Image (cartoon, helix red, strand yellow):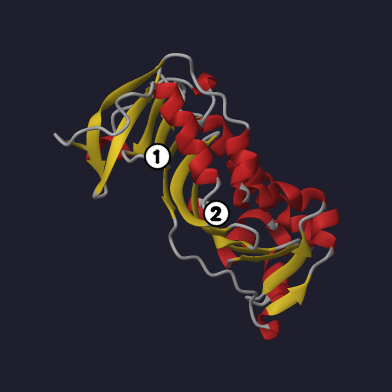
Amino acid sequence: MSRYLRGFIRLAALAAVGVGCLMVAACGPGNSGGAAATASASGNPDPLASLSASEIAAKAIVNLEAASSLTMDGSLLISGQPVTVTLGIKRGEGCAGSIGLDSKGNIKLIVIGKTVYINPDDAYWKAYAGSKADAAIQWANGRYIKTTTSGSMAGVTQLCDLSHSLGSLKLSETMTKGKPTTLGGIKVLQITQGSDGWLYVSDTAKPELVGMEMTKGNSSVAAVLTFSPGAPVTVTAPPASDVVEGSAVGSS
């Protein structure tokens, strides 16, 4: 059944690329919705006033990448395909969460070290397995498919590696600081990425990236992502009774 997971592998890899693309200046003009719409003005002193926008952004990204744990939630629009990502990431251990593909299904994902567990729902199989969907559903039987991070599954695990996605960040030279605001109850500083969108950075002496909103002019790539550095995350393998071996998935 491994060949029927290729659609998932491609989409998950695209999601990882999309996350990286959000942080590249070429991603296109931003819009005024999503995270930006929830921010409100704040009159409190700004502890980051002495730093430039690019200096703040660079520090915030490094600090987020160094977090021992965090959660990441958001939505992407990639080549017209809506993708939602909900992940808890624990540095040095792995991650757990889900990738939603709108009407094409949902995949639960657990990565522990070099082991990957993926659990596509029936809607996914029906969207990508074609005439073999019923056989695929019967084979998986609601269980997690166990494979490794090698081969084609390497792209999937990049979703759990902030060092990979944030490490490729190229900050715009036209970044500017906005006024301190609040976002989800957190005091933040909004940083404009030229015409590409916004970064939201915790407005503290140790800034961390807590949100971003980016769009592309032709809407082929769009995203709103939020990060919660320090949020508690538990990464646990599913019970053996809920697992089916699928080592070939990663190498096919």
User: Percent from the top left, x then y, of residue 98?
Assistant: 54, 60
Q: Quadrant of the rendered structure where residue 118 is? A: bottom right
Q: As drawn, is 39 to the left or to the right of 118?
A: left
The N terminus: image quadrant: bottom right
Distance from label 1 to label 2 (Cα)?
37 Å
Name the outermost residue toward the bottom. Answer: 241
User: Percent from the top left, x then y, of residue 89?
Assistant: 55, 57
- Which residue was labeled with disc 2? 104
The residue located at (69%, 85%) in the rendering is 241
Helix, strand or loop at disc 2? helix
80 vs 194: above or below: below
Q: Are marks 1 and 2 in contact (CB under 8 Å)?
A: no
Q: How crowded is mark 1: few (under 14 residues within 10 Å), some or many (20 or more)?
A: many
Q: Quadrant of the rendered structure where residue 249 is? A: bottom right
Q: How crowded is mark 2: few (under 14 residues within 10 Å), some or many (20 or more)?
A: some
The residue located at (41%, 20%) in the rendering is 29
- Which residue was labeled with disc 1? 207
Q: Nearer the viewer, residue 230 or 198?
A: 230
39 vs 136: above or below: above
Q: Nearer the viewer, residue 28 or 93?
A: 93
Q: As drawn, is 50 to the left or to the right of 147?
A: left
* Residue type marked 1: Pro
Q: As drawn, is 252 to the left or to the right of 59?
A: right
The residue located at (62%, 31%) in the rendering is 168
Which of discs 1 and 2 lies nearer the camera? The answer is 1
Helix, strand or loop at disc 1? loop
Q: Nearer the viewer, residue 248 or 163?
A: 163
Q: Does the rendering let one see residue 215?
A: no
Name the outermost residue toward the left. Answer: 43
The residue located at (51%, 20%) in the rendering is 25
* Residue type marked 2: Lys
